[in-house]
Image: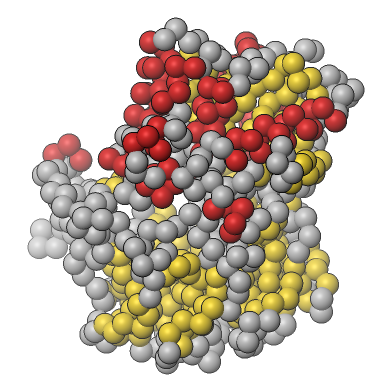
Amino acid sequence: MRAPDIETLVTVGRPAISPDGSFAVFATSRPDLVADRSVGQLWRVDLPDGSPRRITRGVADRSPALSPDGSTVAFLRADAKSRAQLFVVAAGGGEPVQVTDLPGGVTDLSWSPDGTRLAFAARVPEPGRYGTVEGRDAAAEPPRRITGVRWHANGLGYLDRPTQLFVVDAPPTDAEPFYPPAPALDDPEKRVVAAEPTQLTEGDTGWSGVAWTADGSELLSVPDVIEDDRRDLRDRLVAVTIDGGAQREVLSEDLSISEVAVAPDGAVFVLANDVGSEGTDFVAPGVALFAVESEGPRRLTDAETIDLGEVGSHISFDGDDVLVQDRTRGRLRLLRVTRGGAVTEVLGGDLEVNGHAVARGRVVASVASSESFGELILVEGGAARTLTDFGAAVRERAIVQPVEHEIPGRDGYPVHGWVAVPEGEGPFPVILQIHGGPYASYGVHVFDETQVLVDAGYAVVYSNPRGSAGYGREHGRSIRRRMGTLDYFDVMDFFDGVVAADPRLDGERAGVMGGSYGGYMTAWVIAHDHRFAGAIVERGFLDPTAFPGSSDIGSFFGQEYVGTDPEQVAAQSPMAVVGQVTTPTLVLHSELDFRCPLEQATRYYAALKAQGTQAEMLIFPGEDHELTRAGRPQHRVQRFDAVLEWWSRYLPAEG
């Protein structure tokens, strides 16, 4: 697989299934180099034996939701100004009808139980900002007054456009089209939409989630109030009435809520984690399934051993049972949880379940595997069958299947990971890859980062050391306030173990690279081990001292992971040991990265240059922390080009 082949990486989004289980709808997305953006449409597949077919032809259609009678699909589509708007289309396909035209764009959507209305969330900018006045750009906006501990977010920017809740009548999909009005002096701002939405909330509080109560009278959502003086990750669950916007509190505990869902019988469930009485204990959070009852939340899954916290994890219902996805050892499996807390596996194996839906005993799931970035699978009667073949194009690129290993560390602790090796006898130069997080993990899906390096002639070693997700909370919390200790030992011990066991791996020719926490760990490695011919430090958490005042998670992340005592922080800081680095280092970063801000890179790079260490820095304009996963496709290819060029200089692959 080569860098331009990222165009073959087709993602299958969270599916929707008709109430009678007769068909499913899902969205695909893939990078397109010509368009220089992610592109995708909605697809329909009739169950159980149909072939998938496109039902929309937008540039980037996503987030399909089927009406309760299965006749209509609501979804999001970007308008001419790249703002996500709400559309509806007949479930069999046709010309979509635009429902909203909001300056801040739509973020969430949900059908009312009777199918007559749609609830959605949308960012509401202050008048005069974010293009609300034609011809007035950001440089002409008034200053922003900031009084809270949070003011920006990666991938968004400033937080001065809170997400508000709306409802709108669902328009018929077969009505006569609406037509753009001619210019008029008395109404120059008239919008062209099928219906005018009603705004239910207002003010500085933002809202997350739009779940209807079973009777259709309220929306359940999580308010987000920016704190005045200290970060608090505890959430409240609030019901907002459809008629009038009155609010009542449903849940207020020491929980951080990531998903809210209402069962057909009206029972309320959340995915949430306990953040303690101080409201900031988020390290290896232990996201679990809770039933929200009159006495309070009742935990249904064991947070110590079952991890429901993967990005995109959600809830679906099969009768009285709840389906959720659990990350474990680089996999994501689909679980069934009864209301009594009994847990069984619905779909597992060497795959990652990224989304699911269920009706009439049929489960559809979007999955990734070692041979495909995304497929739709049908589970029925205990058997699983793949309905799509989007991975065919990537398989034609001769992808290599990584080999799984478990290596005992120096203290006997088992370290789990993989090795991907080019075809042939070698010996091949070896690149040690380190993932971000820390509470994240490498998985079994096709990974372009690894495949491109293997194609260029490198063996790639990567593992999930202590601190990673998917091995229980104790594994994840073991590096809290001692980063660069157990995690460093595990990364190096796994590397040494697999290199020693495989004569195809040339341990004398090695490089190291990683992003985010992986950038932290790469910088830590080259300060303490000088065997590597070169290093790539990408979007790294490099200076914990500067992090609190610059990162969008600076108000709690560093304090929880490295502590607040200056000596303790310095003992875990790559900047504190940068003077020990002699390895040639490429520093990669993005201009709009607010998670690990650009100054983390520039301070580190400046220190390397000042002490005479060979170093270069590459900064990508307009990109944020998600460059390698969701950046402009051309930037992603240019990054790969820079990575391979760096290795060709400092770690050439012979032949």
When the figure is inspected, residue 427 is found, relative to residue 332, above or below; the finding is above
Please say whether residue 443 is visible from this viewpoint: yes
The front one of 169 and 462 is 462
Which color scheme did the rendering employ for the protein?
secondary structure
Q: Nearer the viewer, residue 123 or 172?
A: 123
* Residue at (38, 10) in percent of width and height: 610
Viewer-proximal residue, 222 or 5?
222
- Give left or right: position of 456 versus 449: right
User: Vertical placement of 32 versus 366: above or below?
Assistant: above
Where residue 257 appears, x then y in whole percent?
Answer: 43, 68
The N terminus - image quarter = top right
Q: Is residue 21 visible?
A: no
Position of residue 281 measured from the top left corner of the image (x, y, whole percent):
42, 59
**Can you say whether 210 is above or below 33 in the image?**
below
Residue drawn at 34 percent across, 29 percent down: 599
Is 28 or 648 nearer to us in this picture? Answer: 648
Residue at (60% x, 35% y) in the render: 488
Q: Residue at horizontal 77%, vertical 55%?
A: 350
